[in-house]
Amino acid sequence: MGLGLGVGFFLSRSSESENIIALGSPIVLAALVIIGILERLMPYKSEWNKSHNDVGNDTIHLFITQILIGRIMQPFWIFVFAGLTSYLASRYGSDIWPHEINLFLQLFLALLIAEFGRYWLHRWAHEVPWLWRLHAIHHSPKRLYFLNAARFHPIEKIIFLIPETVPFIILGANAECLLLYAIFNSIHGLFQHSNIYIKMGWLNYIFSLTELHRWHHSKKVGESNSNYGNNLIVWDLIFCTFYWPKKKLVKEISLLNPEYPEGYLSQLKAPFLGDIDKPDDYYSSPERYAD
C-alpha cells in the first residue's frame, strides 16, 4: 500500500495527463499480482486457494462492477451535481476542498468522508430487506480470496458509489487526491478479501483489514453484522459494530441458503426472486440471531 501510494503521489506530481486517475490502474494491477502470490505463500486457509468454479464469475463481476459501472456513472454524477457545485462555489468560494493541506492529509479526510456514508449504506444493506437482496451476492462466496472484492450486484454498486463520488464532486476535491483515494480503495479492497494469514495488531483499530473483514463474511448472522467499514474501521468503533475476537478463527462463511445461485446471470436475477436468505423473523427480531 505504501509503495502504491508513493508511486501514485509521484505520478500525480509529474504527469501532464488530463485523466491522472487512470494512472492508478497499473499500480492496482501490480498489487493484485502481489496479493495473489502472497495468498499462495501464506494462506489463511489452504482450501480457500482451491477453485470453487468461481474465478470466471468473479472476473465478470470485476469487469462490470469495478470497471464498466464506474466509467458509465462518472459523467452522470458530474452532470447531476455540476449545478450544486457551482452554487456552493459561488456562495462559499471555489476552494471548499482544503487544497492547501498535505496531499496525504487530504486522502485521510477523503477516506473519513466517504467512509461515513459507505458505513451506513453497508449497515442498512444488512438491516433493510430490499437492500439485503442486492447485498447477498457479495456474501455468497464460499471462500475468501482477492477477487471476491469485486462481487457486487451492479445496482448495489451504483448505490455504493454515491458516498464515494458525490461528496468530492460537490466539494471540488482535486484529481491528485482522488488518484490516491482510488489507489487506496482498490488495493485495500483486494487485501481486505484476501486469503492471507497475517496479524495486523493495532492497525485493526484504524483500518478495516482482512482480519476483521473475515468476520463480516461469517455464516453466523451475529458475527457478520459487524465491521461494516470499507477502508477505515473508525465508524464501527464509534457506532459499536466493531468485532474482533482475537483468539478465534473464522469457520464457515457464505450465506445461510445453500442453494444460492453461483452463475453471474442467475445472481443478477436473485434479488428479484424473493429469497432474502435470512430467517423470516430476522428483520423483526434481529437480536435473536446475535449468537
Image (cartoon, grey):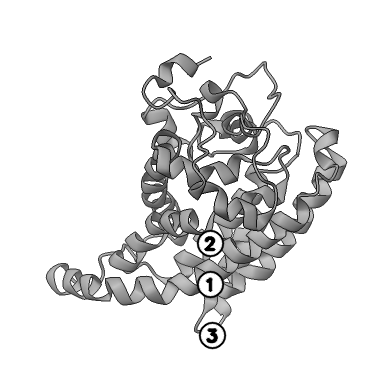
Q: Quickly name the residue at label 1.
A: 21
Give 102 or 188, whichever is nearer the viewer.
188
Residue drawn 70% across the image and 22% down it: 249
Q: Report helix, strand or loop for mark 1.
A: helix
- Residue occupying the far left of the picture: 91
Q: Amino acid at mark 2?
A: Ala
Around disc 1, counting alpha carbons within 10 Å, would you say few (fewer than 14), some (14 to 19), or many (20 or more)? many
Q: Which mark is residue 16?
A: 3
- Residue occupying the far front of the picture: 273
Q: Is residue 99 visible?
A: yes
Q: What is the quadrant of residue 88 in the picture?
A: bottom left
Residue drawn 45% across the image and 61% down it: 103
Q: Amino acid at mark 3?
A: Glu
Q: What is the quadrant of residue 89 in the picture?
A: bottom left
Q: Which mark is residue 284?
A: none
Mark 3 vs mark 2, foreground winner is: 2
Give 73 or 284, whichever is nearer the viewer.
284
Q: Quickly name the residue at label 2.
A: 182
